[in-house]
């Protein structure tokens, strides 16, 4: 279905997290020059979760809650973090049916322990198990 969870702010320099299949367990993919499907097809519809996506070329990754990070070669767009569009593609199409309680954007890659601490904080703040 390619519904956007978020996108960049320029059609030429994209940084996207998208749902690439419909159904009870959507497949999540990341994009920044090439599409890489994440291994997370078990995140059910209407599930509350923390998705940590790292855009760092061939060293990209995706992580759900405090699970194990999965490697994701997201491509090498020269400036994929040039802005942020939530819930749709940069041009307003491919709207995702999402609910976001909080967005945290960092200009550097967080360590695995910092990602876990952030997930614990958000889980406690928004009262759900991670």
Image: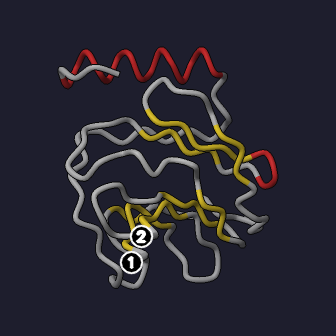
Quarter occupied by residue 29: bottom right
Tell me: 78 left or right of 19: right
| Relative side of 57 to 109, left or right | right
Q: Quarter of the image for the C terminus: give it.
A: top left
| Rendering coords of residue 90 (x, y %) | 43, 77
**Tag count in the figure?**
2
Residue visible at 75% across and 56% down in the picture: 73
Note whether 10 is above or below 52 in the view shown: below
Badge 2: how crowded within 10 Å, few (<14), some, or many (20+)? some
Q: CB under 8 Å between callouts 2 and 1? A: yes
Upstream in sequence: badge 2 or badge 1: 1
Q: Is residue 53 left or right of residue 79?
A: left
Q: In which quadrant of the rendered image does the N terminus lie?
A: bottom left
Numbered tag placed on residue 21 in the rendering: 2
Q: Residue at x 29, y 75 (%)?
A: 95
Judge whether 31 appears above or below 43 on screen.
below
Quick one: SS at disc 2?
Answer: loop
Q: Tell me the residue at 56%/82% (across/down).
A: 11
Q: Which mark is residue 54?
A: none
- Give the residue number, with chain letter if any, for mark 1: 1
Q: How crowded is mark 1: few (under 14 residues within 10 Å), some or many (20 or more)?
A: few
Q: Where is residue 26 in the image (x, y as percent from the top left)?
A: 38, 59
Q: State the image coordinates of residue 109 (x, y, percent, origin top left).
A: 67, 34
Q: How far apart in space, not on screen, are marks 2 and 1 (Cα)?
A: 5 Å
> What colour scheme has been applied to the protein in the rendered image?
secondary structure
Q: Residue at x 29, y 21 (%)?
A: 123
Q: Position of residue 59 (x, y in %)?
A: 79, 45
Give the answer, above or below, for where 123 lies relative to 7.
above
State the image quarter where residue 104 is shown.
Answer: top left
Q: Dot 1: what SS?
A: loop
Which image quadrant is residue 2 in? bottom left
Looking at the image, is 37 positioned above or below residue 103? below
């Amino acid at each position: 279905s390619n519904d956007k969870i978020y996108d960049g702010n320029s059609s030429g320099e994209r940084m996207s997290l998208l749902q690439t299949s419909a159904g009870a367990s959507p497949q999540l993919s990341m994009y920044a020059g090439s599409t890489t499907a994440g291994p997370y097809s078990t995140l059910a519809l209407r599930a509350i979760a923390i998705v940590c996506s790292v855009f760092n070329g061939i060293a990209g990754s995706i992580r759900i809650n405090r699970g194990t990070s999965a490697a994701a070669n997201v491509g090498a767009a020269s400036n994929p973090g040039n802005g942020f569009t939530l819930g749709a593609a940069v041009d307003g199409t491919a709207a995702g049916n999402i609910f976001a309680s909080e967005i945290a954007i960092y200009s550097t890659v967080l360590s695995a322990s910092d990602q876990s601490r952030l997930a614990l904080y958000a889980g406690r703040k928004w009262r759900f198990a991670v």
